[in-house]
Amino acid sequence: MLGASCAQGSTEDMFWKPKEENFWKWFQANESRLFDFEQDQDRVFGELGPEMKKVHPDLTFEFGPKKDGRREFVISADGNRNAFPAVVALADKAPELQRWEIIKFRQRRGRLPDLGYEGTRVKSEDIEFTIEPDRDKAGITLFIKGYDETSHQRLVTIGFLYLDSTLGEYDVETKVGFVNFKAANEQTTLVKRPISELPKVFDDFVASRLN
């Protein structure tokens, strides 16, 4: 009787608690598996994804590498600005977790890795960009080696992954206007620059628009 009563109470607690608290209760119950997810990655990710979508259907995640006994857990809106409040709400409800740093949104990366999608990989040195005003935001065109109509969808996905990596998810969704994609050899009257220079050029551009 005691065991059944306790189990029923636990279920009711889960039902009535806000969805963010339910998620973190699940996270804490599986914390060891999540911290060492490489041991059974498919199963762990297969469970974690649906738990996040109970909070909001567009939420997704990233893990950082282990460093000094800690690990980053990135909560992302997957580029959907409508899900930004859900990212903030979930992160703000996180309990104290000794081995974790909870990060809101995908952050800028200091060094760009080569990125791929559905069997297509693009090196960072194979992407150039131009930047120009788009009302109160920055319009960006990416010139990608190998871009054509047949590879459009794959390279657009990779291009946005590079934008998130260079500018961070929040800035891409709030400060970037149009994003165009073109072949590397297409001509433009603007100055093409390697994508590794985008963070500084973008920050200077945004600052100049604010002044």
Image (cartoon, grey):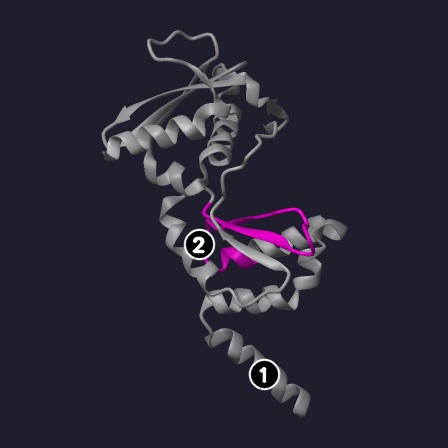
Label 1, residues with CA under 10 Å away: few <14, some 14-19, many ≥20: few
Q: Is residue 53 above or below residue 153?
A: below
SS class, disc 1: helix
Q: Residue at x 60, y 30 (%)?
A: 113
| Quarter of the figure with residue 48 | bottom right
Which residue was labeled with disc 1? 8
Residue ranking furthest to the bottom: 1
| Separation of marks 1 and 2 at Cα, in angstroms | 30 Å
Outermost residue toward the right? 39
Depth check: 56 or 21 in front? 21
Q: Position of residue 13 (x, y in %)?
A: 52, 79
Which quadrant: the N terminus? bottom right
Q: In percent of the image, x 65 and y 56: which residue is there? A: 70
Magenta-tinted stretch: 51-77
Q: Identify the amino acid type marked 1.
A: Gln
Q: Position of residue 184 (x, y in %)?
A: 48, 12
Q: Nearer the viewer, mark 1 or mark 2?
A: 2
Q: Which residue is mark 2?
A: 87
